[in-house]
């Protein structure tokens, strides 16, 4: 995979009709985690830790920050936080693929300095199984 423009990494939230790009994001990140299940016992060879393959909790965390640019996507994120609902989300990674699933908006921060634009930071947590479709 060749180098990609950061602006092509997109977070999209479903508004009930279609997936809408969360406007104004200047930085974004997704992290995948899988917690291992330790099955080490006194009989483990050489007392090395043993992990159970294919077990454990998997999760994805999405975070981003930016400036308010689009009233529709701003309202969608605000509503998602205050209603606490899980929303279908897409994470589009150029030349890689699309990750899709339900996410809950776990954090929404709004900040500003008196001589700068109003900015926001958000965090989403996966709320179910994710699917991956390669490009």
Image (cartoon, helix red, strand yellow):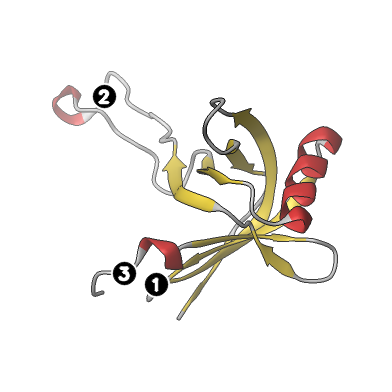
SS at mark 1?
Answer: loop
Q: Residue furthest bottom?
A: 135
SS at mark 2?
Answer: loop
| Residue 103: percent from left, percent from top | 67, 47
Q: Residue furthest left?
A: 46
Quarter placement of the N terminus: bottom left
Q: Which mark is residue 96?
A: 1
Left or right of 51, for residue 49 = left
- Taking the spot 39% from the left edge, 46% from the top edge, the residue there is 53
The residue beneath circle 2 is: 43
Nearer the camera: disc 1 or disc 3? 3
SS at mark 3?
Answer: loop
- In the rendered view, tell whether residue 50 sits above or below residue 23: above
Q: Identify the image quadrant of residue 105.
A: top right
Count of marks, rendered view: 3
Out of 58 and 127, give the one closest to the viewer.
127
Nearer the camera: disc 3 or disc 2? 3
| Residue 15: percent from left, percent from top | 80, 61
| Residue 85: percent from left, percent from top | 81, 42
Mark 1 residue crowding within 10 angstroms, few (<14) / some (14–19) / many (20+) = few
Q: Residues at badges 1 and 2 in contact (C-beta under 8 Å)? A: no
Mark 1 or mark 3: name the one nearer the start of the chain.
3
The residue beneath circle 3 is: 4
| Residue 129: percent from left, percent from top | 63, 54
């Amino acid at each position: 995979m060749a180098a990609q423009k950061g602006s092509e990494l997109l977070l999209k939230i479903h508004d009930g009709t279609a997936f809408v790009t969360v406007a104004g994001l200047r930085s974004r990140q997704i992290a995948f985690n899988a917690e291992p299940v330790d099955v080490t016992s006194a009989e483990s060879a050489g007392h090395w830790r043993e992990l159970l393959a294919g077990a454990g909790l998997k999760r994805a965390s999405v975070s981003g920050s930016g400036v308010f640019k689009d009233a529709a996507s701003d309202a969608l994120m605000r509503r998602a936080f205050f209603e606490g609902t899980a929303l279908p989300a897409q994470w589009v990674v150029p030349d890689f693929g699309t990750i899709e699933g339900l996410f809950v908006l776990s954090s929404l921060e709004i900040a500003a300095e008196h001589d700068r634009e109003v900015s926001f930071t958000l965090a989403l947590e996966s709320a179910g199984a994710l699917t991956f479709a390669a490009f």
